[in-house]
Image: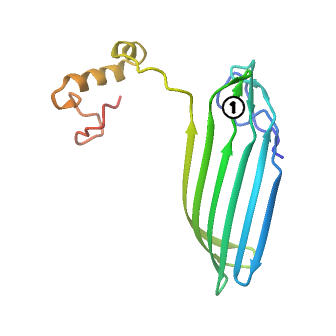
Amino acid sequence: MVFPWGEYFPDRLINLGSNRYVIRPSLGLLHRRGPWEFEVTTSLSFYQDNDAYYPGASVLERDPLWFLQVHVTRELPRGQWLTLSGGYSYDGELFLNGQSLDYTERTSFLSLGWGMALTRQQSIRVACVRADTQVALPAARPTRSAAEMERSAPIAARALRETRDRPGGRPTRPCAGHRSWDKTHVACS
């Protein structure tokens, strides 16, 4: 169980606390065969509604998050081991004041690690982790024109104009801190 500890201010978008409880039951299986160890763990997180979400009078709801992880460990001589781990999570939809935000998230990871016992209570572990997060967002808003951009972000609009009007598609001057032109780079402030 996760408690809603940490400062929470409903009028701020970013907070240390989440203003909601999370209940996370999990189930794990472990099988050991000689120097090999196989483990499978799954969990499901249930979120309480945050009834004081930004800007203070909104209600944020979240569907449960499901997580599955698998570990294979091989013991080696002299207190060492190798481990291969993988996992997948599926995050349910978010709702703000009962309206779906059309936001879902899926994350997968793969990890290869080596470890060594230093003492009976301490060990060292080195791992290489690859993670991939796929986020499904609502349909993107239509592209804004240069005039609309200039009203909301003058620097970006100027850079867009300079890029469009300059032969070769480059800005008229490089940004501070950049030594050479980069065709994919538009401008820095």
The reply, left or right, for residue 150 in relation to residue 45 is left
* Residue ID at (25%, 38%): 183
Q: Is residue 130 above or below residue 77?
A: above
Vertically, is 168 above or below 158?
below
Position in image of residue 166 (x %, y %): 18, 25
Near mark 1 (Cα within 10 A), the count class, few <14, some 14-19 or many ≥20, is: some
Q: Position of residue 54 (x, y in %)?
A: 69, 23
Residue reaching furthest to the bottom: 77
Residue identifier under label 1? 94
Q: Is residue 147 left or right of residue 1?
A: left
Residue 116 location (% of width, % of height)? 64, 77
Q: Residue furthest left?
A: 167
The count of marks equals 1
Measured along the vertical axis of the image, is residue 67 above or below residue 182? below
Q: Nearer the viewer, residue 59 or 122?
A: 59
Figure coloring: rainbow
Residue 104 point in image, percent of width and height? 63, 37
Residue at image coords 68%, 63%: 70
From the viewer's side, name the closer residue of 57 and 109: 109
Mark 1: secondary structure: strand
**Figure quadrant of residue 13:** top right
Tell me which corner region of the image, top left, top right, bottom left or bottom right, holds residue 35: bottom right
Give above or below for 70 relative to 46: below
Q: Quadrant of the image for the C terminus?
A: top left
Q: Amino acid at mark 1?
A: Leu
The residue drawn where x is 27% and y is 20% is 161
Residue 135 picture quarter? top right
Q: Nearer the viewer, residue 53 or 27?
A: 27
In the rendered structure, the answer to whether residue 22 lies left or right of residue 155 reads right
